[in-house]
Image: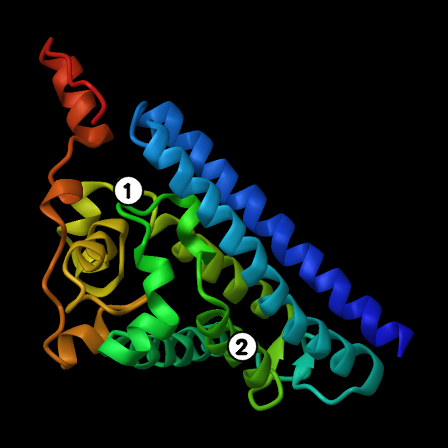
Amino acid sequence: MIELAAAVLAMIAIVAVRYLAVSGGFAWLTGRRHPGLYAGERMRGQMRREIGWSLAAAAIYGAPAGLTLYAWKQLGWTQIYTDWNAHSLLWIPLSILAYLFIHDSYFYWTHRAMHRPRLFRLMHAIHHDSRPPTAWAAMSFHPWESLSGALLIPALTFLIPIHVAALGIVLTVMTFFGVTNHIGWEIFPKRWLAGPFGAAMISASHHHRHHTDYRCNFGLYFRFWDRLCDTDRGLSGELAHAPDDDDRRRAAADGRVERPS
């Protein structure tokens, strides 16, 4: 029982520290790249609320992760493995894609359901209180929403084999997209957004559109379900058309100055 409690507390601490480090890092980067974007007393109050809700969410996300850690290390109940030869090496990237696609599908349909009026008021309104969202909003969820999101990845580890390193990549991708989708500026170059990457993947420009028009752009990683279900409304012009590094380099070469937006 002590080992179980230790595993749960350790994972809660890890999720909380990961949130503070990654969201804090991107908040710092935002201040450097886009001074003033998070400025003002209203935004400071919003960010304090985002951090409070997110730390509560860290406890909810950390608990099933800790139970999974205990089930893996102490009981051998999960499908997590460490031996590179336990499955084909091809399964490493395939398992990553499988986890991400299942997670994205689950996120799309639960997220879309939470935009029904009753569920929105009960579960999702807290997240949309961030107007506009910031890097700190990545885990700013009502506890019921946190619970709905915290269970899937742990559950998958009992069903689908995955190398521990591949699971680390899945969690890294999840963290990266969760934060960068909310930072309020586009991290990817315009040429990426205009090409195959932008056609397939969610970006800040895509998700920011969701935060201004609640009826569209429900995905997390991929635009697949939004396109299939006709809920994709494209990119936010506010973000997608803002000058990026390529624009600034061209402006500098032409002798013009482009101020950061």
Nearer to us in this view, 146 or 256: 146
Please rate how many residues cluster around mark 1, counting C-alpha atoms within 10 Å: few if below 14, some from 14 to 19, many from 20.
Answer: many
Q: Decide if residue 183 is on the left or right side of residue 87.
A: left
Q: Decide if residue 258 is on the left or right side of residue 118.
A: left
Please rate how many residues cluster around mark 2, counting C-alpha atoms within 10 Å: few if below 14, some from 14 to 19, many from 20.
Answer: some
For badge 2, the amino acid type reads Ile
- The quadrant of the rendering that contains the N terminus is bottom right
Q: Residue at x 13, y 68 (%)?
A: 232
Instruction: Tell me, yes or no, if residue 82 can be seen here.
Output: no
Residue on which the image places disc 1: 184
Q: Is residue 110 above or below residue 190?
A: below
Q: Is residue 238 above or below residue 30?
A: below
For badge 1, the amino acid type reads Gly
Residue on which the image places disc 2: 153
- The quadrant of the rendering that contains the C terminus is top left
Q: Decide if residue 82 is on the left or right side of residue 137.
A: right
* Mark nearer the N terminus (1 vs 2): 2
Residue furthest right in the image:
2
Q: Position of residue 101 (x, y in %)?
A: 37, 77
Q: Position of residue 179 (x, y in %)?
A: 41, 51
Estimate the spatial distance between the alpha carbons at disc 1 and disc 2, rounded to whole Å: 27 Å
Residue furthest top in the image:
255
Q: Secondary structure at mark 1?
A: loop
Instruction: Tell me, yes or no, if residue 210 can be seen here.
Output: yes
Q: Decide if residue 78 is on the left or right side of residue 129.
A: right
Q: Residue at x 53, y 63 (%)?
A: 171
Q: How is the image coloured?
A: rainbow
Nearer to us in this view, 232 or 144: 144
Q: Is residue 55 above or below residue 124?
A: above
